Image (cartoon, rainbow, N blue to C red):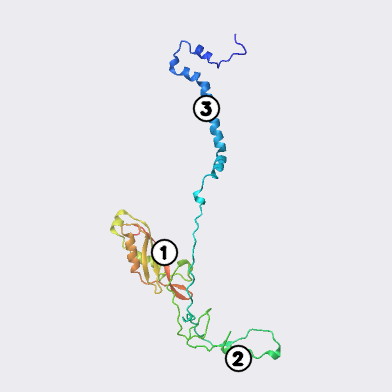
C-alpha cells in the first residue's frame, strides 16, 4: 500500500488530513505556508548572521572614508613674551642671617692633608687648647650667655639674629611629642564627666554615640578653631564644643624641642547610661 516514494510532507496530504474539517480555523493555512515560512526564516537568519560576522570588516573599511572629528588637530601658535630686563641697579636680596655664636669657644682644626714636613706652615691645636674649646672648621670666640643647642650649626652672627618662628599647624602623627591634657587620659575623662551637661532633648530621645571634634592645640596649650565634624544632634555637639572651649590649657606638642601648633581630632563617646 505504501511505496518507497511516499512523501507525507506534500501539500496534497493536507486536503486528506483536513477533509470535512474547518479549514478557516488557521491550522490549515499555517501548515500550507510552512515551507515558505521556513525558507524565508532561513534566508533572513543567514543574512543577519553574515552581517554580524562581517560588521567589523565593514566598519573598518568605511572608517577611512568617514572623517573623524576627534582626530582633528587644532594648531595654536603660542608666542612667548621675552623675560623682563634685569635691573642692574637693584641691589641683590640680603643673605640669610647666620646662626648665633656657640656657648663654648671653637678653634680651627685643620683637616688632615698629607704633605711634606717642610711645607707644613701651621700647627694643629694642642691638647691644652682642646680642653677649653671645641674643634671646628674655623676659630670662633664663644658667648658664655648663649643657649646650648644640639645638632644646630653655629656662626659668627650676633645673638640677636632674627629667628623665624614656626606658626604652621602640624599633623598629630608627625610630631615628636603629641599634645596631652594635663593629668593624662584619666583626668580628661573625669573632666568631661564632670562638666558635660547632657541636653534635655537628647536625654528624652535616648541619644547615644560618638561626637567627633577637631581643634588646634596652640603653643600655650589653649584650644582654638574648635569644629564639630560629626554631630548626634539634639544639642550634643554644641555642648561638647562648649566644654572644650572652657577646658584648661593642655600640654602643647613639641617638635625639635620647641612647642608647636598641632591639629587634634577627638572622638567623644556619649552614653545615656553614664548620666
Instruction: Determine which of the numbered discs, if any, sits on residue 265 in the image.
Output: 1
Q: Which of marks 1 and 3 is nearer the N terminus?
A: 3
Q: Is residue 122 left or right of residue 251?
A: right
What separation in Å lies between label 3 and label 2 (alpha carbons)? 114 Å
Residue at the image position 54 percent from the left and 28 percent from the top: 43
Q: In this view, does 234 lie to the left or right of 61?
A: left
Name which quarter of the figure residue 221 lies in: bottom left
* Position of residue 68 measured from the top left corner of the image (x, y, whole percent): 51, 48
Q: Answer with left or right where residue 188 lies relative to residue 41.
A: left
Residue pointed to by mark 3: 41
Residue at figure coordinates x 52%, y 22% from the top left:
36
Q: In this view, does 41 lie to the left or right of 125?
A: left
Earlier sequence position, callout 1 versus callout 2: 2
Query: Which residue is at a point 52% across and 26% down the rendered structure image?
Result: 40
Q: Are circles 3 and 2 on residues that touch, CB within 8 Å?
A: no
Q: Nearer the viewer, mark 3 or mark 2?
A: 3
Rendered view: 16 above or below 103: above
> In the picture, which quadrant includes the C terminus?
bottom left
Q: Examine the rendered structure and indicate whether residue 142 appears above or below residue 72.
A: below
- Marks counted in the figure total 3
Q: In which quarter of the image is residue 129?
A: bottom right
Q: Are marks 1 and 2 in contact (CB under 8 Å)?
A: no
- 33 or 175: nearer the viewer: 33
Question: Mark 1: which secondary structure?
Answer: strand
| Residue bearing mark 2 | 128
Element on which disc 3 rests: helix
Q: Earlier in the sequence, mark 3 or mark 2?
A: 3
Q: How crowded is mark 2: few (under 14 residues within 10 Å), some or many (20 or more)?
A: few
Mark identifier at residue 144? none
Amino acid at each position: 500500500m505504501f511505496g518507497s516514494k511516499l512523501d507525507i510532507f506534500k501539500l496534497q496530504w493536507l486536503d486528506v488530513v483536513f477533509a470535512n474539517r474547518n479549514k478557516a480555523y488557521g491550522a490549515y493555512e499555517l501548515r500550507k505556508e510552512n515551507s515558505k515560512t521556513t525558507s524565508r526564516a532561513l534566508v533572513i537568519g543567514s543574512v543577519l548572521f553574515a552581517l554580524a560576522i562581517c560588521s567589523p570588516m565593514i566598519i573598518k573599511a568605511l572608517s577611512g572614508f568617514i572623517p573623524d572629528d576627534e582626530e582633528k588637530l587644532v594648531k595654536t601658535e603660542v608666542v612667548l613674551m621675552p623675560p623682563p630686563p634685569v635691573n642692574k641697579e637693584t641691589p641683590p636680596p640680603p643673605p640669610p642671617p647666620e646662626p648665633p655664636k656657640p656657648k663654648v669657644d671653637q678653634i680651627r682644626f685643620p683637616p688632615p692633608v698629607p704633605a711634606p714636613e717642610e711645607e707644613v706652615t701651621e700647627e694643629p691645636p694642642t691638647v691644652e687648647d682642646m680642653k677649653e674649646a671645641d674643634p671646628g672648621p674655623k676659630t670662633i670666640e664663644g658667648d658664655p650667655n648663649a643657649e646650648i643647642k644640639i645638632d644646630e650649626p653655629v656662626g659668627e652672627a650676633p645673638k640677636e639674629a632674627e629667628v623665624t618662628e614656626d606658626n604652621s599647624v602640624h599633623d598629630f602623627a608627625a610630631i615628636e611629642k603629641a599634645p596631652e591634657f594635663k593629668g593624662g587620659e584619666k583626668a580628661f575623662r573625669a573632666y568631661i564627666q564632670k562638666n558635660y551637661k547632657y541636653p534635655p532633648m537628647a536625654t528624652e530621645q535616648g541619644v547615644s554615640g560618638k561626637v567627633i571634634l577637631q581643634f588646634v592645640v596652640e603653643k600655650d596649650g589653649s584650644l582654638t578653631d574648635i569644629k564639630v565634624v560629626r554631630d548626634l544632634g539634639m544639642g550634643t555637639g554644641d555642648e561638647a564644643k562648649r566644654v572644650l572651649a572652657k577646658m584648661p590649657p593642655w600640654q602643647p606638642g613639641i617638635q625639635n624641642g620647641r612647642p608647636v601648633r598641632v591639629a587634634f581630632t577627638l572622638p567623644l563617646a556619649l552614653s545615656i547610661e553614664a548620666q
